[in-house]
Image: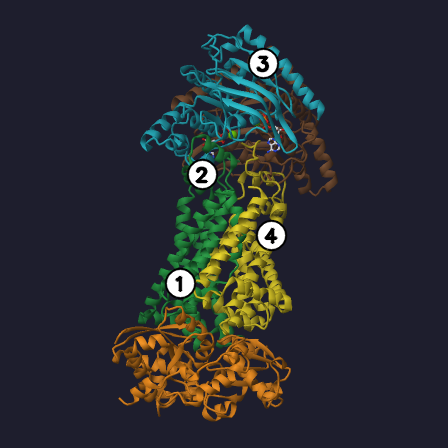
Chain colours: A orange, B yellow, C green, D brown, E cyan
Amino acid sequence: PEKPKVTLAVGGKSLVVYLPLTVAEQLGYFADEGLDVRIEDFKGGSAALKALLGGSADLVVGYFDHIVRLQAQGRDLMGVVLMGKYPGLVLGVRTELADKVKTPADLKGLKVGVTKPGSSTNYFVFYLLAKEGLKPTDVAIIGVGGGSSAIAAVERGQVDAISHVEPVITTLEKRGQIKVLVDTRNKEGTEAVFGGPYPAATLYTHRAFVEKNPETTQRLVNAIVRALQWMQGKSAEEVVAIMPKAYYQNDPELYTEIVRNSLGMFSENGLFPEAGPKTAYKVLSMFDEKLAAAKIDLSKTYTNAFVERALTR
Amino acid sequence: MDKRRVRLLQLALLVFLVLGWEFSVRLGWVDAFFFSKPSEIALRIFEWFKSGEVYRHLWITLAETVLAFTSGTLVGVAFGLWLALSPVAAAVLDPFLKALNSVPRVILAPIFTLWFGLGIASKVALGFTLVFFIAFFNTYQGIREVSPVVLANARMLGAGRNQLLRHVYLPSAASWILSSLRTSVGFAVIGAVVGEYLGASAGLGYVISQAEGVFDTTSVFAGIVVLAVFVVLLDVAVSVVERRLLVWRPEPGQEGGTV
Amino acid sequence: MDKRRVRLLQLALLVFLVLGWEFSVRLGWVDAFFFSKPSEIALRIFEWFKSGEVYRHLWITLAETVLAFTSGTLVGVAFGLWLALSPVAAAVLDPFLKALNSVPRVILAPIFTLWFGLGIASKVALGFTLVFFIAFFNTYQGIREVSPVVLANARMLGAGRNQLLRHVYLPSAASWILSSLRTSVGFAVIGAVVGEYLGASAGLGYVISQAEGVFDTTSVFAGIVVLAVFVVLLDVAVSVVERRLLVWRPEPGQEGGTV
Amino acid sequence: MVRPTNSTPAVELLRVTQRFGEYTAVADVDLRVDEGEFVAVVGPTGCGKSTLLNMIAGLRPPAAGEVRVFGQSLEGLNRRAGYLFQADALLPWKTALGNVALGLSFAGTAREEAEARARGWLAKVGLGGFEDRYPHQLSGGMRKRVALAQVLIMDPKILLMDEPFSALDVQTRQLMENELLRLWEEDQKSVLFVTHDLEEAIALADRVVVMSAGPASRPIGNFPVSLERPRDVTEVRLTEAFLEIHREVWGLLREEVMRAHGQA
Amino acid sequence: MVRPTNSTPAVELLRVTQRFGEYTAVADVDLRVDEGEFVAVVGPTGCGKSTLLNMIAGLRPPAAGEVRVFGQSLEGLNRRAGYLFQADALLPWKTALGNVALGLSFAGTAREEAEARARGWLAKVGLGGFEDRYPHQLSGGMRKRVALAQVLIMDPKILLMDEPFSALDVQTRQLMENELLRLWEEDQKSVLFVTHDLEEAIALADRVVVMSAGPASRPIGNFPVSLERPRDVTEVRLTEAFLEIHREVWGLLREEVMRAHGQA
Ligand SMILES: Nc1ncnc2c1ncn2[C@@H]1O[C@H](COP(=O)(O)OP(=O)(O)OP(=O)(O)O)[C@@H](O)[C@H]1O
Ligand SMILES: Nc1ncnc2c1ncn2[C@@H]1O[C@H](COP(=O)(O)OP(=O)(O)OP(=O)(O)O)[C@@H](O)[C@H]1O
Ligand SMILES: [Mg+2]
Ligand SMILES: [Mg+2]
């Protein structure tokens, strides 16, 4: 390959949405392709993206949303393989309020926790409200952070509902703190909410990188696709078994549960469904005037060429 | 040395930095995505103040900073005094304090949320843990630097423990303590902003965090600039206190009688 | 006051804290999800060292800390010296430095990555920005505290600028500078760890960050404990330096001739 | 006027030794200051005079032996004593007035009263008008006088004075000496007065103690001064008796100093 | 032996004034120290003697008037002068040896040589064996002697001495005085010597200058001392000529001090 040493940036490597990356790493698929992949872990997808833009990382494993946003800012980024078909965003409500709040419409006047203002979890709430005819200002959005501070915020009653991703959701569920209202970890939920597939975890980079290093890109895609295929039909326990011990040692049961809840999210072959990017753009541009104003050629945000080649091997 | 020349030089330096920045961006030497442009940042700040939306955030951050600063300083100074005057306690607690000071506060955020909720208190707590140690270490050392002759004199004149504190230890350690204030003003702000950044619903850190989420570097820098101006103003306040407390010192070059 | 008693008291305090923690968790007063259990933490640390996987991380964090600490201290002291001896420069730069010190380093992380890449350098830079200011402010103040008589004496004896620095300013400011080292050891570690925490592929901060991602509080605390022990050891090194540099001081209660 | 020898001495040193690390400054010192007695201590520089005063003040306990104050073994600070230090010991952050009023305010005297009395004392030491100066704004001799007022205002029963007048010009010095004598005569103070000025020692004291050169210094001479009281320090210097004692002490001291310098 | 009056004076003050804020310490002072001349300055405490020395040392430029050194107007520090400060000015972080060797090492002398010479000087001031002590481990008089050695080792052309011997016992003081005279006579040093001891002033100097009481102090008396050289400081005190000058100066000083105290 043109570039046997590759640096991948990821915003939270141990997060379950990026599971296929760890699978490929743990099973040695990158090495099998003759690549020396170094995975740099960041706090959050936007930090990982900045590492790419700054030139210190070659590719990013992150959310598709970012590609769309950055296209609007004139950065020619493109996804080369899709790992998550569904965004995995979940809206839950504190158990005590479960009988009062049955749909997003009931959130009016309540405090909703999100990872960070301006993040996907935040827009997810806005989107749900908009679908019910409510305005963003009808709820109070509170940033609760990504990790256990989110748990703390719910348990202390600092927020009434929470829009978050794994592992926070399953953890809260297991602790009996929330009841899930809206769930996009699976096909039904995602289609009910977004009316179509919504691409999530993606391996992406600059178009220039892809053009300059087609072989390297191909091999990376090969490894990821192989990991996705390996995951097909595996049980949560089987997947957990190959994970680094650090991921599950604290509470294997909880981790297995999280994986089980998430297995449906992953793409079985890595292909971007054609409707996916449109859904993403539609949702994102609802709350971002700059994005709405920008002319974005969605066909440039991804390519299935590498995946197709990988699948024919 | 005169005030006006200093102000002029400062202005010149500022203009130079700002222009350098502006042109580096415009000429494409640095990437606007990461650095934005001073002109845009200025515009953004102007808009913030014009629309008035920034006041609420500024006010919250100010409150957090001032609370963290005063509580951290007071407790740090008190603790420093106590330990400096109780050698055994100091020897025993020393490694514990050092160890505590090395804990990255960012990691403690969940615990702060758990204990203090998401409101002002948890940000104040975060700032407190930064300010406290700076005030503590400086006070501790300052007290130990007290001139033994002056101390002995005050004791012979019948000073009790509290009187020694008030009339000897504190004035003597004043320049140490004030110096710690200089450093910790900045850290108090950092505590507040990082706290907001990690989870909040208002404050400058919140604004910055939100801007970061949508890659709005201009707003991020606008936030930083507002912050910085804010700290410089706070520091002026500290300087005023310092000048009032240290009237008794020889100004450099005016030490006639002593030399 | 004797060493053994101090060690015993420290041990007692440690045992008390650890047992208190353990039982609060076991009795359900505090939630193991957030606080883990000392016994488990100890076990985890033991496993880390047994399997040897922690050494690589420890080594990287150590390297970053030491680099940030030494570079930050050296540059901070040099800068402090320079400004303390050039009143105009000090007056001009003062607000700029204050403003810079107030910038939350967490927000700068992406820029550091941009400039210094993903390796050690960007973490060192983060630690540097913390250590620098502490060393700078303390040195600056320490230099200004030099006794005017001693200074005049050295000048009359023919000391040039560099000789004044070496024989008067630096020894006189030594206790200020050393005190800043005490504070900044902790901050150097924080810089390194936060840098790793925000983006890295190795180091204790990385370990902690990974653990946080899967709610492995035990590993988070294990990381913090390893860190803390590590800082206490670094601090012992600083103390040794301090004792060697300050032999000339009266030990408390030994100031016979002076009193 | 010869003072009555009181039964319990104000200060008594019993085989007192002081060490600094390896160095023995004073060894096996026996010394006694009766109530109302004025004792002057002279000796080669560095012999251990300040060391003695520090022990009597309770600032540094002796390595061996015992210090007794009014018959009681001294523990901690000597609360009956006022100590005029050899080194500059004013609080740099207090004005002259604040420094002089300090002891009174420690004792709980109301601020106005303390300041009024401090003002009076500053005038007595010739520093009226300098109330608001900080120590660094005063000359060496002025600082010494402020320190003098600072101690005397407290009216202590025992006065420890370490070269109090050496930074003063001759005339001011004599004014201060006379003032000191007046105070001492007014109420039976016990004074231990370290000086290098032999004439001053003889002119003021009831007894002059001569210390040997260090290390391991101790008193080697004890000269009672039987000059009339009240004395005027200027006039007394011209009497025959004065010159007699002066010659004696001088001879002994000279020997000691020569010995010390010979040793080195 | 009367010194020849040289045409360019070593130090010359021309209508020099010094102020501290509102307070005028010295005003319109004219003073001249010839090359090889030994001038003693006496005056009431706080009149401005140290202030004068500071100006001549170049540590604080005068508020008005001019200081000339060997005919040249003084800018910045006076590099020809050695200054023995009134206050403690040793470097606390250097041993006695290190302090004495300091000036030489600043001048680039090799370490061994500097230390050897410093050792010699310490012995001369009677402090052989105390080389390794830090200042805080020395007595007041010992520190003064270290400072003396520190200045004299540099062999400056102009010597400014501010009460150098006041902390020494009489005998050590006389040893030092004789040493100083010897040095001065060996090579035409110009000395400006501040003291409160009138006898010392007359015994040592070619000329005694009396300052008036402050504020706005200036020289009000100028007494040439025409005693034979070389002098022995002990013996010269007994001569008639000595007593004559002493009486004169004394009278003037007494008046000044009384005026000062009366004022206050
Ligand atoms: N902290 C100390 N460490 C070591 N030696 C000391 C210390 N303090 C005093 N000494 C020594 O003890 C001796 C006596 O000192 P002291 O100050 O009592 O002398 P002194 O009689 O007051 O002299 P002077 O007349 O010069 O004031 C000196 O040799 C001094 O060097
Ligand atoms: N920094 C200062 N600020 C204000 N006044 C000062 C300062 N330095 C000196 N003075 C005043 O100047 C006058 C002269 O001081 P100086 O130290 O020269 O006196 P001196 O003649 O050396 O006295 P002494 O014999 O006591 O040493 C004093 O009245 C003093 O209070
Ligand atoms: Mg003494
Ligand atoms: Mg003086």
Q: Nearer the viewer, mark 4 or mark 1?
A: 1
- In the picture, measured across the screen, residue B157 lies left or right of residue A8, that is right
Question: Callout 1: residue from which chain?
Answer: C
* Label at residue C219: none
- The three-letter code of the residue at mark 2 reads Val
Q: Is residue C25 visible?
A: no
Question: Disc 3 to disc 2, how far (Cα)?
Answer: 39 Å
Label 2 Cα crowd, 10 Å radius (few <14 / some 14-19 / many 20+): many
Give the distance between the C-alpha atoms of the residues marked 2 and 1, in whole angstroms: 38 Å
Please tell me which residue lies in front, B16 or D103: B16
Q: Chain of mark 3?
A: E
Give me the C-alpha separation between circle 4 and circle 1.
33 Å
Per the model, the C-alpha gap separating discs 3 and 4 is: 54 Å
**Does E201 sit above or below residue A40?**
above
Q: Describe residue D34's horizontal placement relative to residue A71 as left or right.
A: right
Say which residue label 1 marks: C115
Task: Depth check: give the residue in front, E54 or A200.
Answer: A200
Q: Are marks 4 and 1 on the same chain?
A: no
Q: Quadrant of the N terminus of chain A?
A: bottom left
Q: Secondary structure at mark 1?
A: helix
Asked if residue A127 shows in the view, the reply is yes
Q: Position of residue C91 (x, y in %)?
A: 54, 47
Q: Mark 3, residues whose alpha carbon is within 10 Å: few (<14), some, or many (≥20)?
A: some
Please state which amino acid type lies under the numbered disc 1: Trp
Q: Chain of mark 2?
A: C
Left or right, D62 with respect to E43, comes to left
Report the residue marked by disc 4: B236
| Residue annotated with mark 3 | E222
Q: Which residue is mark 2?
A: C168
